[in-house]
Image (spheres, rainbow, N blue to C red):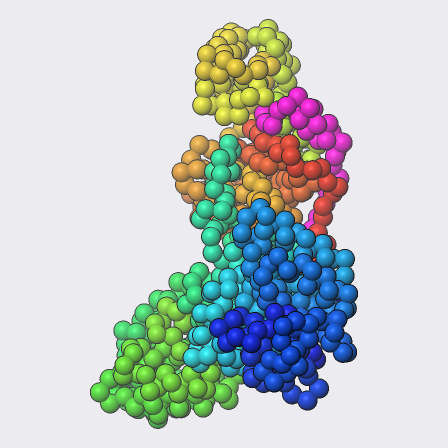
Amino acid sequence: MSLDPFFTPNSVAVIGASTKPHKLGYAVLDNLVNGGYLTEGRQVHPINPKAETILDLPAYPSVNDVPGPIDLAVIVIPYPLVPDALRTCGEKGIPATIVISAGFREAGMEGLQRERELIEIAKEYNIRLIGPNCLGVIDTFTPMNASFSAGLPPSGPMAFMSQSGALGTAILDWAQAGRLGLSKFVSLGNKADVSETDLLLAWQDDPHSRVILCYIEGLPDGQEFIRVARHVSKKVPIVVLKSGVTQAGSRAVSSHTGSLAGSEQAYQAAFHQAGVLRAHSLQDLFDYALAFGYLPPLRGDRIAIITNAGGPGILATDALERAGLRLARFEPECIRELEQFLPDAASAANPVDLLGDAMSDRYRFALDQISADPHVDGILVILAPQALTDIGETARVVSEIAGKVDIPVLTCFMGEAQVKAGTEILEAHNVPNYSFPERAAMVLKGMSTFRGYQTMALPTFETFEVDHTSVRETLDRALSEGRVTIGDAEARDILTAYGLKIPASELAETGDQAVEIANRIGYPVVLKIASPDILHKTDIGGVKIGLQNPTDIRDAFDLITYRAQRYTPEARLWGCLVQKMAPPGLEVLIGMNRDPQFGPLVTFGLGGIYVETLKDVAFRIAPFSRREAEDMLGEIRAHALLDGVRGEPPTDKAAVVDALLRIAQLVTDFPEIAELDINPFIVYEEGLGGISIDMRLVLNPETPQKGLNHEAGPAGRNS
């Protein structure tokens, strides 16, 4: 169902409208009546059984008493009365409701039960619901203020959604001060029904919204958010400020991957895969909003700097380079024109230094020449207030030219008191100004990143022919025995079922069996303790490598089993795994930790014993494409090792990518796998593949088994 009734209703009922100015029900009604909504053809209906009129409008005891249809109901009554009011809305056929009332999930278990009742009623009557416990909804182009925020913010190209009502009031206050121009504002509250993904789908084609801004505290269905945002971000930039990442993902884990992964890593991977830009502060959010809201798109990474001070120009150059952008190389004709006009001491090369005595005419000439250069994709104009600087006129010149050209022009008028007259002019003409060069560079980097998201093809997800039944049997056997861990002895069957290579290996219950197996598979061999209760074998001395003869094997078998019995007396011992020793190669880690909001978070990094110390790893939410897997290899700091260093040949990166994709399919197919490690996965030189040496899994017995879960297109109740 469309969300249009929330933003462009022809009739609105305020359930709980009050005659008392200090009540929320009065504030909401007043905003609707005196905020510009009541034009020809639109109606507002106060609902209050104890009043005849409110704000000169006839009041009704119930929505059922209102003649004619109602498109939107705003509920502002005590929480015990809300379910009955919502049911009445359903009987009236009202398609959309905003529940401002608090006292639901945020109030504890009883509140959670009340909220579940609202959800059931909304489903029964096919009502879309925003809230409860929210600030309300604003559409500045309707115009409509169905909230208890005072005043209507100025219209602009920025749509904003917030899970926090208090933060929403601050955003609206900043907007009313002229800092932001909003098209739509939604306080989501508890998100009992309408969520971020619903609004993304509703706003993706909104002609008034050039950028979507989000404040998020949690995403209960992270996979749906990725699917929807991945498509919406092809049309409009999405900028997200996420809070609460440091504590939400912390929990006891038993694998290397679990210790490396957390909520922050999951969100970072999810936003990247979804084409979402991450703001790390409110300042970042505002900075991005201004650029995406008011500037033309950035076509490339070639940036020109125009400055009247050398130091700030160098700072800007450094910031752009750190952001991965390039200084534009001007056309020879452009340089000649600049050299002929500018003083001899000025610099016509990029960054263009107009000198400290530059007046507005130099800025105008430089901007005219540089904006016409086909090698320039964006311009950063820096002004430091100096004795001869005409700040106001320079701001007018920059605003005039920025409004005519088809490339983004950002400004950095540095300072505060002296440049205020100029920054006010820039703000009035919607030219983004940033106090420091680093902020401007960050915004340009964000615009460049968004351009990459738009031009990147939507991912395709490969599936491999695998032995699903064999894995099912292994997992079911472990769970039926009350085990939640699967060690290397059993995990090798899972790897083989999903097409990953493992060394020849067999389980031996005695030293003599170990010798017989070694004679058959060939020396040298590795012995590993085999126990469903011992995941970290090296911690108890449960591994012996490089065994060359029967005597070594018998001695190692006795020593390993003795250590296991001594250090883990309660562990069940199956014997030792005899494994053909693999040739040396580059050791990497492939792992997975299941995030509660996004699902399987797959990890790649250098393997061995140092992985947790170095934490040189990359993450993706499964499922992901082959291109995304290839990107993971390039994101670790030690990626050069994969390409070969100091005469070493390049490694078989295709084999690593193949292994990542197979593991992603495994953990997507079996949601009860909570953690997984392959450490090490040894990768050999190009063309020789890779081999999984040691693997362990942790299961969650409470996870319901599902069918195969491969990627679908964008989904949502209003799609």
Q: Which residue lies most toward the left here?
A: 387
From the viewer's perspective, tell me whether residue 305 is left or right of residue 526: left
In the rendered image, which quarter contains the C terminus? Answer: bottom right
Tell me, yes or no, whether the highlighted magenta stretch contains residue 467. yes
Quarter in which the N terminus is drawn: bottom right
178 vs 532: above or below: below
| Residue 162 coordinates in the image, percent (x, y) | 53, 64
Is 696 a magenta residue?
A: no
Viewer-closest of 427 and 174: 174
Q: Residue at x 71, y 37 (%)?
A: 705
Tell me: 621 left or right of 648. Answer: right
Residue at the image point whose x is 34% and y is 80% from the top: 413
Magenta stretch? Answer: 460-487
User: Closer to the camera, 10 or 712?
Assistant: 10
Residue 25: tell me if it is visible.
Answer: yes
Q: Is residue 436 above or below residue 547?
A: below
Q: Is residue 82 above or below residue 564?
A: below
- Choose top left, top right, bottom left or bottom right for residue 661: top right
Q: Position of residue 465 (x, y in %)?
A: 75, 39
Is 2 above or below relative to 359? above
Name which residue lies at 69% across and 78% down.
11
Q: Nearer the viewer, residue 278 or 518?
A: 278
Percent coordinates x, y for residue 202 in the rendering: 67, 69
- At x 69%, y 38%, the residue is 704
Count the marks: 0
Residue 658 seen:
no
Quarter of the figure with residue 311: bottom left
Q: Position of residue 315 (x, y in %)?
A: 32, 69
Direction from residue 697 to residue 586 in the image, left or right: left
